[in-house]
Amino acid sequence: MQTAILLSVAVVAPVMSSDSNLSWERETQGDCQEVFGGQVCTWSREHGDELVEFGATVSLATVENAPLEGEMVFPPIALARIALPESVQKQTGVDHLGVNWEVHGHPPAPFMTPHFDFHFYTIGADAVDAIDCMDLSKPESLPETYVLRDETLPDGTVLVGVCVPAMGMHALAEPEVAATTLFEASMVVGYYSRNLVFVEPMIARDRLMRHEDFTMVLPVIVAPGMGESFPDGFSAHFDEPAGAWRLTFTMPVVE
């Protein structure tokens, strides 16, 4: 992994911390993989030893080149698995990003539109692959307003907790599940065997094609499988000069 010092006055100069040690603000690059002809890369931003933000940069080419025709595949195939920087793994437990493309969307009805799943997994890739949805146990508690419903597919298959093999159960915000219009962006919380296994910004292609910044509420999550600290905010910024989306999880401010 490569570490780059951010080129701004506030970053180039050292910052005096409360313990009188000099610290630097820097951005650390994770890994990159190609998805639909564009690059998807992970990164983190630190102030000294403190993690400030982390996330992924998604090339506009990835969004524009996503196919709009094709069969609905179940379970969906991961297009990429991209490691997060070590600082993210250590402080939050978030291990890697898994990218999925849902060409037709999926049930329930508000999500039946082409969209990307950006799964930020708190377990390793081998553990994700081992999820077979045979464990039907659900977490003891869910974030406020979230539900973990059972969903029946057109062929009659019942997904307990909307459990998808090689992903996990999907807890959704109840107002979004009950909506009568197609969604644009939703924050999904994933579980398996009662443990947290991912947080997922699920974003419609149409929303990404508008090139307009937006935020989503990241609910308060209390569950086994979390790191020593966990993000409390999410934003998506379109970088016009770079031709890319920057998906950002922000960490709580340490006082």
Image: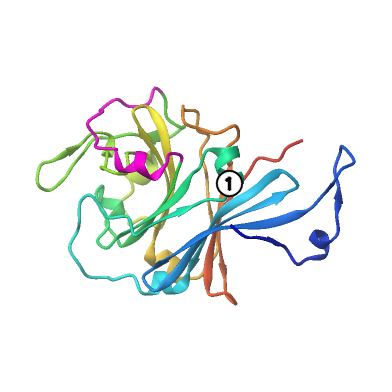
Residue, x 55% and y 42% (percent of image)?
Answer: 89
Name above or below for residue 237 compared with residue 91. Answer: below
Q: Position of residue 118 (x, y in %)?
A: 42, 53
Name above or below for residue 192 compared with residue 126. Answer: above
Q: Name the colour scheme.
A: rainbow
**Residue in the foreground of this view, choosing between 180 and 229:** 229
Quadrant of the image occupied by residue 19: top right
* Quarter of the image where the N terminus is located: bottom right
How many numbered badges does the structure rendering display? 1
Q: Residues within 10 Å of mark 1 (few under 14, many from 20)?
A: some
**Residue in the foreground of this view, choosing between 240 and 80:** 80
**Most extreme residue toward the top, as rendered?**
140
* Quarter of the image where the C terminus is located: top right
Q: Is residue 71 left or right of residue 120?
A: left
Residue, x 26% and y 53% (percent of image)?
Answer: 76
Report helix, strand or loop for mark 1. helix
Residue 133: say if magenta.
Answer: yes
**Most extreme residue toward the right, as rendered?**
20
Name above or below for residue 23 compared with residue 240. Answer: above
Residue 17: say if magenta.
Answer: no
Determine the main secondary structure of the stretch shown in magenta.
Answer: loop
Quadrant of the image occupied by residue 241: bottom right
**Residue in the foreground of this view, choosing between 24 and 232:** 24
Q: Which residues are magenta?
A: 122-140
Q: Is residue 205 left or right of residue 27?
A: left
Q: Position of residue 238 (x, y in %)?
A: 55, 68
Residue, x 42% and y 25% (percent of image)?
Answer: 141
Q: Position of residue 62 (x, y in %)?
A: 41, 70
Instruction: Check disc 1 and report the residue beneath it.
Output: 86
Name above or below for residue 81 compared with residue 169. Answer: below
Looking at the picture, which amino acid does disc 1 mark? Glu
